[in-house]
Structure formats: structure tokens, C-alpha cells
Image (tube, grey):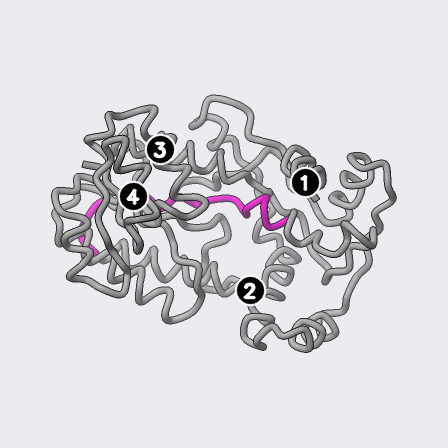
Amino acid sequence: MIIVTGATGQLGRQVVESLLTRVPADQVGVSVRDPEKARSLADRGVRVRQGSFTDAAGLAHAFEGASQVLIVSVDKMGDECVAQHRTAIGAAAAAGARRILYTSQMGAGASSHFQACRDHAATEEALRACGVPFTSLRNGFYAASAAHFLGQAVESGRIVLPADGPVAWTAHADLADAAAAVLADEGCFEGPTPPLTGTEALTFDDIAGIASELTGRTFTRAIAPDGRFLEQAVGGGVPREAAEQLLGIFTAARADEFATVDPTLAELIGREPVALRTVLRDQLSNG
């Protein structure tokens, strides 16, 4: 039984869909906070159980009989995030899983400029200490985030963000297929994987050029000083801690934490990864 957590989220749902093309549905289980949202999976023969990273007893039921558990990282940062991941790791180990997999990030490191990457590093330490073989999927930075950061630029044509650096933007669908491939080939990675990335690292200067080509309009890149970006975000209603975490993405990019391009993702999924241009085309055509 392969258990996938967060199976109603953007990444987790795609992992399950990809996994179902590789293994029978009766060998797949999901742990979700709201089983009603996973009804369509249950209808296809997937085992659906309620589970929350804040409830170890509930996870014991959700993970029952697991041979492998994929822990999809929570959409939080800081101590709360790491505590929830530790709870999930403990529950997977207690359930007797032979392997625990975790969706980490290519920039994972205790000294990262980005809080999420420090959280991933702390979670990987918990995995090393749990006594169960593990695979940490070092996912590339989500291409969907690049599209999101375009934000108001779709209307104004001006991409106003802090100074950045090259990022190996990577599509959710490719990362989901990679996770499914690793789950279906138990033990093909031990510990952290190489960075699972797209084929090129691009800056927002590059993205402005791509957006211009795709739309026939002119997109320009302007630098927002870090302090001004922070204050404008806070002034717009973003909590200061969250704004500082957001700024950390750009600080980390300037330090080349997301710049590595690696062939492992393409090898895992058996095709060229989706280009950022394709993700932006879909976003701009829907905008």
C-alpha cells in the first residue's frame, strides 16, 4: 500500500493520478483532511482516509498497512511547518513503512536565505533520524510561482519585483510524474535526490522577454528595492513575517540557490520537462 498525503492539493492530486497509471488502485491510499474532497478517488478504488499532520492518532489510521508514505510538505513556514512534518514522519515510521518519501526543494539548506528551504533542511534531518529509509525529492521551484509573480504586470506590462537571480522553474505535472515514478520503483533513490528541475534557469528579465514574445505586448522589468517591496507588501495587507518570507525567495535567488539545472527529472519522467514558456503561455492566455 502506497500512501500519498495532501492528495487533494495541487501537487498531491497529480501524484495520485500519475501513480494510478503505474500501479493498481487497490495498492494506493490517500491521507486527506477532508475525505469528501477525495470522493472521486474513492470511486476509482483508492483507499481514502482522514488524516492531519496535527493529529498523530488519526495518521496512524490513515497510514495503516503502508509500505511507502509520500509526505507532501505543508503550505506553511517556520516551527509549525517542521513540527507537522515530524508528526507525519513519526506516524509513517510507527505504521511500519519501509520507505518515507518527502517533497523537499532544490534549495534545501540550513543556511538558505529562504525560510521554506531551511524548513525543508530541518525536515530532512528528522528523516535521517527516524530510522526508516527515506527519499527526499529535491523539487525545482514551481513554475506556477513565476506566473503568479507576474501578477499586475499582465495589466500594466511592468514586472516590478526585487532583484533576483536565475531560477530553474519546474512544472507541477513533471514533479508529480517524478514522484510517482520513484514510488513505483521503490528504492531507486536513497536520501536526497539531485535537483529535479526544468532544463533552463531564467531570471525575471528573461520572463519579461518571454511574456513580450507570447503576447505581442511589451513587458518591462523594474527593480523594487528590498525595503520598498517589503513596505508595499505590508501596506497591502500582507503580514510582515509573510512579506519577509516572500522577500527571502528573491534573496535566495540572488545567491543562486535555485540556479542549478540537472537532467535527473527528464530521466525519471522519460521526456523533456515542460518549459516555463509553456506554463506562461497557459497563464497569459487564461488571464
Mark 2 crowd level (few <14, some 14–19, many ≥20, 10 Å Cα): many
Q: Between disc 3 and disc 1, whose residue precedes?
A: 3
Closer to viewer: mark 2 or mark 3: 3
Q: Which mark is residue 4?
A: 4
Residue at the image point whose x is 57% and y is 76% from the top = 239
Q: Which mark is residue 113?
A: 2
68 lies left or right of 243: left
The amino acid sitting under disc 3 is Ala
Q: Disc 3 on helix, strand or loop?
A: helix
Residue occupied by mark 3 = 180
Mark 4 crowd level (few <14, some 14–19, many ≥20, 10 Å Cα): many
Q: CA distance from mark 2 to mark 3?
A: 30 Å
Q: Disc 1 on helix, strand or loop?
A: helix
Q: Is residue 107 in sight in this rendering?
A: yes
> Which range is magenta?
130-146
Closer to viewer: mark 1 or mark 4: 1
Closer to viewer: mark 2 or mark 1: 1
Q: CA distance from mark 2 to mark 4?
A: 29 Å
Mark 3 crowd level (few <14, some 14–19, many ≥20, 10 Å Cα): many
Mark 1 crowd level (few <14, some 14–19, many ≥20, 10 Å Cα): few
Are the residues tagged 2 and 3 within 8 Å (C-beta)? no
169 lies left or right of 105: right
The amino acid sitting under disc 1 is Asn
